[in-house]
Amino acid sequence: MPLFRYSRWDGSQKLDLDADQLLSAMADDLLYDGDPWRALRRLMQQGARMPEGGRMPGLRDLLERLKRQRQERLERYDLGSSLEDIKKKLDDVVQTEREGIGQRTPDAGQRARREQKLDAIPPDPAGRLRELQKYDFVSPEAKEKFEELLSSLRQQMTQPFMQGLQKALSNMTPEDLRRMREMMQDLNRMLRQKAAGEEPDFEAFKAKWGQSFPGVESLDQLIEQLGRQMAAMQSLMQSLTPGQRQQLDEMMRSLLLQDERLEAQMRQLAMNLAEFLPLDEMAQRYPFQGDQEMNLQEAMRLMEEMQRLDELEREIRGVRQLEDLERVNPERVEQLLGPEAREDLQKLQELAKQLEDAGYLEREGDELSLTARAIRKIADKALRDVFAVLKRDRVGGHAMERRGAGGDQTDETKAYEFGDPFLLDLKETVMNAVERSGPGTPVRLAPDDFEVYRTELRTQAATVVMLDMSRSMLNNGYFLPAKKVALALSALIRGQFPRDALYIVGFSLYARTFTPESLPTLSWSEWNIGTNMHAGFALSRQLLARHKGGTRQILMVTDGEPTAHLEAGVADFSYPPMPRTFQETLKEVQRCTREGITINTFMLERSSYLTRFVEDMARINHGRAFFAAADRLGEYVVVDFVRSRRRLIGR
């Protein structure tokens, strides 16, 4: 049998979000601008909170890890110590030679001349390196140490140009210099041809010089390799102090650029590479502040690591679409940030597929759209968000004291009273008799023992949710709460009152209807100037005229007074509002009242104009007006809708 082990949650355990949780995490963003791409991108960027605690990391978390990795290196290493290491080794060569002179030169005069020549060598590393290459050593040990150092430095300093030349440059001969110039000429010729739009013969170059560039299979790979290595050297130079930079530059010239023509070719190479790569952007100055010493080879390797961190950061910051994210290499992320970061990246790369497989997203070419199933899920979440508030501070807000005399049976029971439908709860009835008379048989029933089920009468209702879609709603941040209200009402009616009718009317300069399914994808472009309540009430009255029985009501959500009305079907806008706009809007309120339509208004602002207008409207219509904070709007609207229905049942 499988063995399971349980432990206390400590935040370190990793849980995956399923498709339902991912859609829930995206819901507010989807409602805000109606674009699945944007909502998905924000989820990828910001991550999401887990229902069990903790959170799913996003791209911002990967960027934060990159920042920590970079800062850890800056605080650990002393970049200048790479030159100090060279200086110490050169000092050791000079000291070894001095000791060798004393041991191998018995003649005092000759020994003095040797020491005088040794003393004439400059004390700075670049000067010593230059002069020691011309010096005739007495001590074989000193000569061996210097040649080893020289070979090591040449290998390290040629890395920014071409790795395969390191062995040849350890013992540079005139023939080696000639071949190096020839190779540089061929390379520069290819780069110039590519810049001119021609097709260089890379295969011929590879056949001739391929041993100098192991692993390179194309000209683009060669350009990338050379550019990265050259940028690393430039970063090293820029990160040193001016004095250290001068010393390193002089050492490079004395080690490599022994030929003016070779120097010119190398400078030309740097210029040609700049045509294809942003070398200035790739080469960064890094303010190292640590005290851990390193040699030049380690410093070059550190520069390449810092460069790869910068490249990955630019790549992640440049993610705009899923295709951009898919191009981020998980292996490189693992090399720089560890296996956990790779796992987080791969989860982000699979987000869209996970939602598509669950039936929440549909892809048509480059377009993503929500499915009907996703819209229902978002509506259900909006309803849960509303009633989550009720659970915290309005316990029992749905309870009714009065019940209907007939209709649908509920799960609640009560003591039988004369006139109640005789829907007997046999179990509770028998238990009441046993509790009254005690155990034993036969069980004798009395009238007070009878327990019957309560019933609830349901009637049909038609509701129009009038959403103010003026620019002020958008600018004041009321757009998202208003959409969530409409979706919550849709979910409530679909789930609890399936025979009811719900219409969504949006009004700004004009009024138009929306289906609940279209609400999540409403974008900012749908919102306009003007608050034309006159047009909204007229359209709502036409919709409710289809329903002759039951309750008909309008729930209007707005943040401002009417600023437009219709004149012969054309909107007349004015701000501040004209008296005629108020008059025409109140006339439409009177028409709704005569047809038995109740108007309840939910105000998101308390301007004097709006307050005065709503008071006049409530006086005419006998509806209600509420002032609601944006984050509590859903609570007010949905609770009022349910309560309105319950009072009808009571009658």
Image (spheres, grey):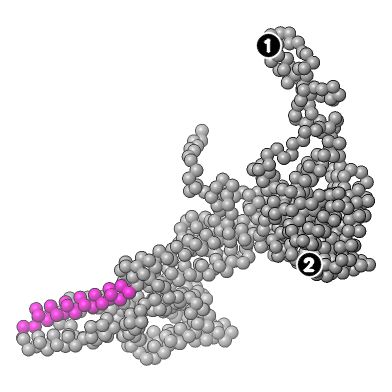
x and y percent of residue 188 in the render? 48, 85
Q: Quadrant of the C terminus?
A: top right
x and y percent of residue 44 in the render? 59, 59
Q: Is residue 189 visible?
A: yes
Amino acid type assigned to the residue bearing label 2 in the image = Asn
- Badge 2, how many Cα within 10 Å: few under 14, some, many 20+? some
At mark 1, the secondary structure is: loop
Q: Quadrant location of residue 643?
A: top right
Magenta region, residue range: 80-107
x and y percent of residue 400 in the render? 77, 35
Residue sitting at x 88%, y 53%: 620
Asked if the stretch drawn in magenta spans residue 445, the answer is no
Main SS category, magenta section? helix
Label 1, on which residue?
438
Amino acid type assigned to the residue bearing label 1 in the image = Gly
At mark 2, the secondary structure is: loop
**Mark 2 or mark 1: whose residue is earlier in sequence:** 1
Q: Is residue 219 visible?
A: no
Label 2, on which residue?
528
**In the foreground, 446 or 604:** 604
Relative vertical location of residue 78 with respect to residue 502 in this rendering, above or below: below
Asked if the stretch drawn in magenta spans residue 81, the answer is yes
